[in-house]
Image (spheres, rainbow, N blue to C red):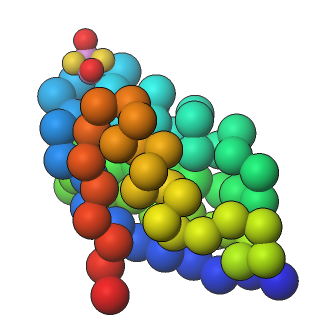
Amino acid sequence: QQEEIDFSIQGMTCANCSARIEKVLNKMEGVQLANVNLAMETGHVLYNPGTVTPEDFVKRIQSLGYDAVLNQ
Ligand code: 9UX
C-alpha cells in the first residue's frame, strides 16, 4: 500500500538543512521515498499509510527545528 503527500517546509537556509531533513524522513518507518527541495521549500514523501502518517512527518520535521505545512 502506498500513498504520497506534498508539503511546504519553512526554515531551511542551506543545502545541509534540506539534506538533513531528507535523510531523517527516509529513515522513518513506513517511508519508501522522501525528497526535499531547498529552492522550492517543499517535501514529497511516498509512504505506507498503515505504518506512518503525514502528521508524523510534520512532527519529525518540527523536532529538527523547522516547520512544515501539509498540502491539502
Ligand atoms: Mo546550514 Mo541548516 O549550515 O540548519 S544546515 S543552515
| Location of residue 37 with respect to 42 vertically, above or below | above
Residue pictured at 41% horizontal, 43% vertical: 61
Query: Residue 1 versus residue 37: which sits nearer the camera?
Result: 1
- Which corner quadrant holds the C terminus? bottom left
In x, y percent, where is residue 38? Answer: 27, 42
The answer to whether residue 15 shows anywhere in this view is: no
Left or right placement of residue 28 versus residue 6 in this view:
right
Residue at horizontal 40%, vertical 35%? 63
x then y, percent, for residue 28: 69, 46
Front residue of 49/3: it is: 49
Residues 37 and 21: in front is: 21
* Displayed-image quarter of ligand 1: top left
In the rendered view, does 72 fall on the left or right side of 56? left
Q: Which of 60 and 32 is in front in this view?
A: 60
Task: Please provide percent x and percent y for residue 21.
Answer: 45, 36
Measuring 22% from the left and 35% from the top, which residue is drawn there? 12
Give the side of residue 16 with respect to residue 60, left or right: left
Tell me which residue sits at (51%, 69%) in the image.
54
- In this view, 27 is above or below 3: above
Give the quarter of the image for residue 65.
top left
Number of marks in the rendered image: 0
Judge from the rendering whether residue 28 lies leftward or rightward of residue 59; answer left or right.
right
Asked if 18 appears above or below 9 in the picture, the reply is above
Q: Quadrant of the N terminus?
A: bottom right
Could you tell me if residue 4 is visible in this image?
yes
